[in-house]
Structure formats: C-alpha cells, structure tokens
C-alpha cells in the first residue's frame, strides 16, 4: 500500500505581452513556488492594509515557455508507469476558463508538437505493450462528457450525432441509480469508480485509440465566450482501463487511468454572459462548487460524511479523491492582470487539494477461468504420478481412436506459440513412444522442406533483392509526390490571378509557420521510416541467414555450440521485432501528421475564399 497526498503542479498560461505580477522559483529539493505581487492602488486611500504578496507552494511550477513534452515527462509519465504496475491513477486540470486546461490535457489542434497528455499517454502505453513481452495486456477506453449534469458517451459506435443533444444520454444524476440506459451493451461491465452505465470500448492498438480520441474531439461542447474563443462547456473524463497478466498465470492486474479536463469556472458578473451561455456557466460553477465541498470535507480530519453524491462529476471521481488512486492535479493560471483574482483562487484550491491523502493498492485478482484450468491440470498430473508409482503399464496395441487423439494433441502442442504449453500423455509408455515417433517424422519433413527452400532462395536471391530495392525506391517517390501534391492541391481550382493572390495570402497567413513546421516534421518522419525500413530488412535477412546456418550445422551434425547459436538467433529476432514495432509507431505518427496537414489546408483554403470574396465586394463598391 502506498499512502501519499495528491501531487499538485502549476502551469502559467503564455501571454502576448510580458507581465511582472508573478514570479516563479523552482528548487531541486524543496519544489517550486508561485508568487503573485499586487501593488496597492492609490485610489484605496492613505490607510491601506491590503495584502500585496501571495505565495503558494507546488511540487513544480511550469512557466510560460514550458513545452508539452516536458509536461508529459514530468507529470503524466510517472502516473502511467504506476498504472502499468497495477495502481489506479488520475490526472486532472483545474483553473478558470481560458487558462489552458484543455490545451494541457488534450493539446492543440494545429501543431503536432502541441499534443497534450491524452494522446501522448496513449502512445506511451501502447509502445510499452509492444516492447514488454513478459506481460499480456488488454485495454478498454471510455470517454464521458458531463454537460449540464447530463452524461454523454462520446465513443458510442452506433451514434454519429452532429449535435451534443443527439448523443445517447448515460443518465441524469440522482440519489438512486436509474434504470440502465438502452444504449449500453449487456456484456459491458464497469470498473469501480466509473459510472456503471458507461460502456467501455476495446482499444486494440495505438492507432485505433488515437483515431477514437481524435474523432471524439469533434463531439465536445465548444463555444465562444467573452473569456475564451473556444471554451469547453463540459467536464470530460477520458478513462483507460488496463488488464495485465503474465503468460500462464491466473493473477490479473487491473488498473485504470482517469485523464480529466474540467470546465473552467467563470464569474458571470465579470463576463456579462446571458442566455444559453449563462445556463451552462451556472451548471459549471455549481459542479465546481460541489467539487470544492468534497475537497474541503476530505481535508478535515474529523469529517464523517463526504458529499460525493451532490454531483455526477464527484460521484465518478470518488476513487480519485480520497480513495484507492494516485492522483495528480495541474493548476492552470493566467498571469493577466484582469485574471489575477481567479488565479489566486485556483492556487488556494490547489493548496487544499494537497492536504488529501490517498491509499493506493496494487489491484490484483485471480481469474476464475484460468484458476479452474490450472487446478484441473494439477489434478490430472497427480493422477498420472499416482499411476506411475503403482507401476500399472499396458502392453496391448493403441487403438485407432487413441492414435488419432495423440496426433491431434501433438499438432496442437507444436502449433501453439505459448512457451508454457505442455503435452500431457500420462504414464502410458505406448503413447510416449508413439509421440516421439510423430515428433521425429515432423522434424525430418521440416528439414527436407527447408533444404529445398534454401536452394530456391539461393537461385532467386539476386532478383529478389533488386525487386525489393526497386519497390523501396518507388515508395520513396510516391511519398515525395504526395508532399508535392499536398502543396499544390489548391492551385488547379484557382485562376492565374487567384493563384498569385493566394501565394501572397499564404505567406502572410497566421498559420504559415504551423504548416511549415508540420511539413518539416512529416519529412523527418518519412526519412526515419525509410531508415527503419532498411533496418527491418537487414534484421529480417540476418534472422533468415542465422536460421539457415543453424539448420546447416545441425544437418552436418556439427553441434559444438548449440547454446551460442540459439542465443545469437534470439538476439537477432528481438532486434527485428523491436525495429518493426518502432516502424509501426512511426506509421501512426505520419498518419496523424497527414491528418493535421489536411485540416490546415482546408482551413487555409476557406480563409482565402472568404478574404477573396470580401476584397471583390469591396472593390465593386462605387
């Protein structure tokens, strides 16, 4: 059991103009501190005892120049490692509207380097799955959006709603649980701390998880407000459920990781909103008020009742707040002079959160099905040992049914890639001798086939190498043509005058640097993919050559160093597997970059058409 307080960090949102109202001090041993300095106003009078300095302690404070990669390495990566070890984890961002919560958790929509905690964590986890061969992992993901105290499943595959109201409702919050939602599959079960009505969706690969995440971003409730041009009007909880076990073991490690993007608090009197935005602001502020009530109750030692049921958000995050979880909070603050009061309130809230202690346990359990199989196997082994001790042996010939059953068992044993698979024949020596004869026949057939394949490979190796080289060169030319096509895909639709105007417009457009950065990264990834492809081919050829040398030495009965031969073959195969996994990861990144470039191209074209129409209208006015 690990008992620790909630870890708190602070991040300062970048501003267009430098400001001197705050200072950041990060020390290696004692952590960081954030201090706000508010000079006294002369209009307050000669006698002014107003406090000027507010200083708050954090584990670390990230200033305006901090990159997304540093945020992930410092905050999210340790939590992800604990989740892989079997602990529950939660990362949530808290702050006023427009302070950078969504950018920190989700990331930016333009630059590839602006990826947030969620896509980076998904990539990190799936990369670990491909590299760790000692564990077998299964993953499920869920995404819950709480909008006006109503939950929506953004990953429901049976609904392609264009509006938030068209998505399936999970449930309204109430004291007693409602009837199950008809959209919930009957076979889905929810983990502790997650709404039992929210289905979990299989995440088979890193690419499928990232595609699901990118798709759900289009369903979030975003709205332009006086405080934020793209304000998230809902609380979003992205959950990754992991189940890991060692091959052949009945012990399961179940863990979950909550990545929470809370909607920002907003002072209605300051923003002056009304209508639907006012209604949303009321629900947001009320749910954050209930969250603060829970935090305050947990920080009090003698408090017997914790009001988790006051809101849906606190009910879902019950384990994350004072439960079996390793929780981390990111306080996002704005250094603008108009937002200093809200930033100070955010830091005060973080100090109260730091008082909460969680008791995290490794979530281990026994799989009943695997346990039953293991016990049955143990009973069978005991029966066979008893028969061996008593010395009961049969001398009659094996029947045709017994021979057929043994052949099926041998085939399953040889075809199963599980290294822990055993061949259970019992103490009957007739079956054992017949099994050895089948194995000998199988090995001889394989050696003959490999000798024939080696001769054919020697005849066609030169032509195969030339064909592979030409295919690789053709793929490279296709990639270059793709880049050229993406640069010029807009021009055929424009006249000569429009093309000249478009070149000027593109050079002056605000997203020009973003496009150039993404193109440069894409070219770099293409070059890395080409180099990795060559390494994969070399590793594959090395594995094949080592395998042929090993078989040749066995055929010539030269078995002086069988252990060394096996060791070299294992090293070559592991190198091939690792390089191939990195190549698959680069493929996902390339597809993501192509998606970002396509979105930027469409936006650039739309902006140019709007600008061209406005200029044409202006010139036609007498």
Image: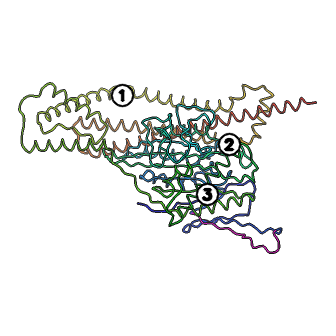
How busy is the neighbourhood of tag 3: few (under 14 within 10 Å), some, or many (20 plus)? many
Work out whether residue 13 can be spotted.
yes
Q: Are marks 2 and 1 in contact (CB under 8 Å)?
A: no
Where 280 sits versus 465, above or below? below
Nearest the camera: 148 or 52?
A: 148
Q: Residue at x 64, y 36 (%)?
A: 597
**Mark 1: which secondary structure?**
helix
Nearest the camera: 215 or 309?
A: 309
Mark 3 vs mark 2: give the one in front.
3
Which of the 4 image quadrants contains residue 502? Answer: top right
- Residue lying at the far right of the rendered structure: 622
Q: Is residue 39 left or right of residue 166?
A: right
In the image, is residue 605 part of the stretch drawn in magenta? no
How busy is the neighbourhood of tag 2: few (under 14 within 10 Å), some, or many (20 plus)? some
Label at residue 331: 3
Nearest the camera: 166 or 328?
A: 166
Mark 1 vs mark 3: give the one in front.
3
Where 36 sits versus 559, above or below? below
Q: Which of the marked residues, 3 or 2, is nearer the chain's N terminus?
A: 3
Residue 302 x %, y %: 50, 66
Q: Residue at x 16, y 45 (%)?
A: 382
Q: Is residue 284 left or right of residue 7?
A: right
Q: Residue at x 80, y 67 (%)?
A: 41
Q: CA distance from mark 1 to mark 3?
A: 63 Å
- Residue lying at the far front of the rendered structure: 176
Q: Is residue 379 left or right of residue 474?
A: left
Q: Find disc 1 in the rendering and name its residue.
A: 457
Q: Find disc 2 in the rendering and name its residue.
A: 514
Q: Which of the marked residues, 1 or 3, is nearer the chain's N terminus?
A: 3
For the magenta stretch, what is the residue range? 44-58
Q: Residue at x 44, y 30 (%)?
A: 465
């Amino acid at each position: 059991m690990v008992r620790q307080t909630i870890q708190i960090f602070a991040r300062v949102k970048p501003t267009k103009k430098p400001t001197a109202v705050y200072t950041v001090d990060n020390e290696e041993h004692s952590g960081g501190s954030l201090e706000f300095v508010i000079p006294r106003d002369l209009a307050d009078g000669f006698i002014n005892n107003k406090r000027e300095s507010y200083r708050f302690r954090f584990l670390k404070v990230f200033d305006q120049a901090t990159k997304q990669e540093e945020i992930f390495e410092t905050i999210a990566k340790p939590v992800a490692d604990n989740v892989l070890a079997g602990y529950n984890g939660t990362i949530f961002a808290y702050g006023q509207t427009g302070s950078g919560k969504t950018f920190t958790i989700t990331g930016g929509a333009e630059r590839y380097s602006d990826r947030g905690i969620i896509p980076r964590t998904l990539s990190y986890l799936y990369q670990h799955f491909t590299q760790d061969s000692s564990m077998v992992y299964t993953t499920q993901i869920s995404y819950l959006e709480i909008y006006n105290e109503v939950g929506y499943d953004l990953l429901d595959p049976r609904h392609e709603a264009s509006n938030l109201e068209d998505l399936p409702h999970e449930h309204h919050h109430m004291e007693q649980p409602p009837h199950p939602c008809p959209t919930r599959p009957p076979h889905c079960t929810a983990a502790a701390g997650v709404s039992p009505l929210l289905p979990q969706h299989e995440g088979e690969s890193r690419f499928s998880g990232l595609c699901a995440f990118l798709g759900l971003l289009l369903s979030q409730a975003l709205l332009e407000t006086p405080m934020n041009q793209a304000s998230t009007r809902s609380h979003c909880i992205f959950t990754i459920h992991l189940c890991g076990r060692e091959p052949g073991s009945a012990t399961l490690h179940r863990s979950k990781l909550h990545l929470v993007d809370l909607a920002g608090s907003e002072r209605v009197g300051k923003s002056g909103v009304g209508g639907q935005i006012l209604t949303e602001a009321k629900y947001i502020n009320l749910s954050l008020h209930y969250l603060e009530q829970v935090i305050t109750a947990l920080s009090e030692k003698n408090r017997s009742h914790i009001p988790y049921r006051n809101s849906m958000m606190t009910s879902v995050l019950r384990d994350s707040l004072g439960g079996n979880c390793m929780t981390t909070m990111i306080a996002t603050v704005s250094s603008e002079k108009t937002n200093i009061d809200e930033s100070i309130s955010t830091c005060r809230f973080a100090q109260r959160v730091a008082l909460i202690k969680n008791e995290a346990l490794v979530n281990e359990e026994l799989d009943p099905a695997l346990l039953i199989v293991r016990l049955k196997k143990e009973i069978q082994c005991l029966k066979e040992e008893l028969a061996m001790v008593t010395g009961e042996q049969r001398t009659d010939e094996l029947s045709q049914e017994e021979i057929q059953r043994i052949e099926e068992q041998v085939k399953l044993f040889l075809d199963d890639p599980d290294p822990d698979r055993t061949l259970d024949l019992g103490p009957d020596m007739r079956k054992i001798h017949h099994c050895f004869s089948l194995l000998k026949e199988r090995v001889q057939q394989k050696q003959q086939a490999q000798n024939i394949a080696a001769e054919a490979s020697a005849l066609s190796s030169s032509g195969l190498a030339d064909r592979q080289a030409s295919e690789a060169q053709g793929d490279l030319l296709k990639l270059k043509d793709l880049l050229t096509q993406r640069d010029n895909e807009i021009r055929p639709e424009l006249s000569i005058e429009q093309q000249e105007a478009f070149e000027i417009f593109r050079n002056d457009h605000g997203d020009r640097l973003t496009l150039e950065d993404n193109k440069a990264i894409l070219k770099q990834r293409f070059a890395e993919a080409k180099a990795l492809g060559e390494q994969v081919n070399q590793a594959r050829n090395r594995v094949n050559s080592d395998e042929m040398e090993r078989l040749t030495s066995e055929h010539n009965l030269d078995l002086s160093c069988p252990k060394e031969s096996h060791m070299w073959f294992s090293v070559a195969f592991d190198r091939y597997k690792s390089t191939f996994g990195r190549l698959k990861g680069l493929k996902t990144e390339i597809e993501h970059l192509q998606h970002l470039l396509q979105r930027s191209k469409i936006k650039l074209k739309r902006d140019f058409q709007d600008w061209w129409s406005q200029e044409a209208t202006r010139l036609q006015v007498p």
